[in-house]
Image (tube, grey):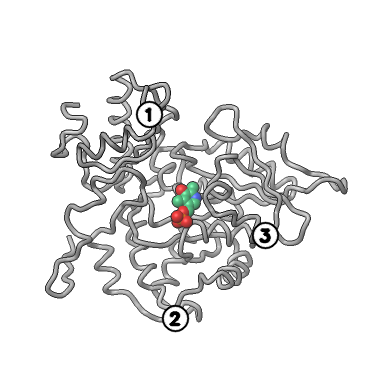
């Protein structure tokens, strides 16, 4: 394990810390010592000039692993989605079709409408987990009737709230969209998790889409950064939009260096993510879910990856119960979602004895 000295004080990134006991979100993951080491060794040339080797290498590496022509480092998943969506939409009238729970509409500060002016149309999938082609076909607008707003982009999300969209359905939707001249973006902030769950390889998914955004700072543990992939022309244009919203940064190597380790170490070298650290967190999530259900608790969603959604209402929990119980046991919990991540935290051995004996 790399050991990094930060002057006379040890780095607060190393050893056990707040992240181990914080199960509110996978954004709580902390960088590993190898990431800190990589940041110390990185290059510091200007990425707005396109001259930083570590950033350029990261973009080439992700393009290769996702089998797209090109890639662009961005500061956050939100920036990745918004830049990609803006880049796809050429001239009005246009509308974007997505799941009603999509991050792009629920958690990105209204970016789609303010940055593109697109009408957003949503679908609530009947199966409760992912959209189907039939639902997309029913809602998409393919018409030159002057009353309607044509669907120019479908934005899918995988995982969505920790739930996997099967490869077969993603393929059906993208094939149909492409036959109908509709672009498809994947919000793959957590695609790593879908892949590690065994749903398909990274490139099985990424090659279906015109663009994909992927996050480094969620379950993968990098401190900052996301990336979008697409064709050469798409990324060239996206670079423009990234700059326009302040996302062109100079010494991007400090971000790219840790992101590279996040992929290699946390997701792992193999295309199915079986050699990294994510699989372990999925097993842990299943155990947590089992403990909950074996005590009569209900789940609101299937546990496909690292998230456990408790059905609070039918389990008799009132809104702040989980937070309060967590506090008593030395854990940060919030809402009715428990997110397990790769750091050493174990609900089974934690000193507070939360879920002891299970
Ligand atoms: C976290 C997340 C994002 C973007 O998050 P940022 O906080 O902007 O990095 C986008 N989509 C999904 C599905 C996410 O989980």
Mark 2 Cα within 10 Å, few/some/many (few <14, many 20+)?
some
Ligand 1 lies under 8 Å from the Cβ of mark 2:
no
The residue depicted at 31 percent of the width and 38 percent of the height is 323
Foreground pick, 39 / 6: 6
The residue depicted at 54 percent of the width and 65 percent of the height is 70
Q: Which residue is mark 3?
A: 116
Mark 3 secondary-structure assignment: helix
In this picture, residue 79 sits left or right of residue 284: right
Mark yes or no: residue 256 visible.
yes
Mark 2 secondary-structure assignment: loop
Choose the circle earlier in sequence order: 3 or 1. 3
Residue 187 locus on image (x, y percent):
53, 50
Q: CA distance from mark 3 to mark 1?
A: 39 Å
173 vs 127: above or below: below
Mark yes or no: residue 66 visible.
no
27 vs 223: above or below: above
In this picture, residue 250 sits left or right of residue 210: left
Q: CA distance from mark 2 to mark 1?
A: 51 Å
Residue 107 locus on image (x, y percent):
52, 49
Mark 1 secondary-structure assignment: loop
Residue 356 locus on image (x, y percent):
17, 29
Foreground pick, 22 / 84: 22
**Which of labels 2 and 3 is toward the front?**
3
Q: Quadrant of residue 198?
A: top left
**Circle on res. 318:** 1
Choose the circle earlier in sequence order: 2 or 3. 2
CB atoms of marks 2 and 3 within 8 Å: no
Q: Which residue is mark 2?
A: 46
Q: Quadrant of the C terminus?
A: top left
296 vs 115: above or below: above
């Amino acid at each position: 394990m790399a050991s990094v000295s930060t002057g006379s004080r040890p780095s607060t990134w190393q050893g056990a810390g707040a992240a181990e006991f914080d199960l509110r979100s996978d954004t709580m993951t902390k960088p590993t010592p190898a990431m800190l080491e990589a940041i110390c060794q990185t290059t510091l040339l200007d990425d707005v000039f396109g001259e930083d080797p570590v950033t350029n290498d990261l973009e080439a590496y992700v393009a290769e692993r996702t089998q797209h022509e090109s890639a662009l480092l961005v500061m956050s998943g939100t920036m990745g989605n918004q830049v990609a969506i803006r880049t796809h939409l050429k001239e009005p009238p246009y509308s974007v079709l997505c799941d009603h729970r999509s991050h792009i509409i629920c958690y990105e500060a209204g970016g789609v409408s303010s940055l593109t002016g697109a009408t957003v149309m949503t679908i609530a999938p009947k199966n409760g987990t992912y959209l189907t082609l039939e639902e997309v076909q029913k809602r998409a607008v393919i018409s030159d009737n002057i009353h309607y707003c044509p669907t120019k982009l479908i934005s899918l999300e995988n995982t969505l709230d920790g739930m996997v969209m099967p490869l077969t359905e993603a393929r059906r939707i993208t094939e149909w969209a492409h036959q109908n001249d509709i672009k498809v973006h994947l919000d793959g902030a957590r695609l790593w998790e879908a892949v590690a769950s065994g749903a398909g390889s990274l490139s099985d998914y990424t090659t279906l889409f015109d663009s994909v955004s992927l996050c480094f700072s969620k379950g993968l543990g990098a401190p900052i950064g996301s990336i979008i992939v697409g064709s050469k022309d798409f990324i060239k244009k996206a670079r423009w939009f990234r700059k326009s919203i302040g996302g062109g940064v100079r010494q991007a190597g400090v971000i790219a260096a840790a992101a590279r380790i996040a992929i290699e170490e946390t997701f792992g070298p193999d295309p199915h993510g079986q050699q990294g650290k994510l699989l372990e967190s999925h097993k842990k999530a299943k155990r947590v879910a089992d403990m909950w259900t074996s005590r009569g608790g209900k789940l609101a969603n299937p546990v496909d990856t690292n998230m456990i959604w408790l059905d609070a209402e039918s389990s008799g929990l009132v809104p702040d119960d989980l937070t309060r119980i967590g506090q008593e046991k030395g854990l940060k919990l919030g809402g009715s979602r428990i997110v397990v991540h790769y750091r050493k935290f174990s609900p089974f051995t934690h000193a507070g004895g939360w879920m002891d004996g299970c």
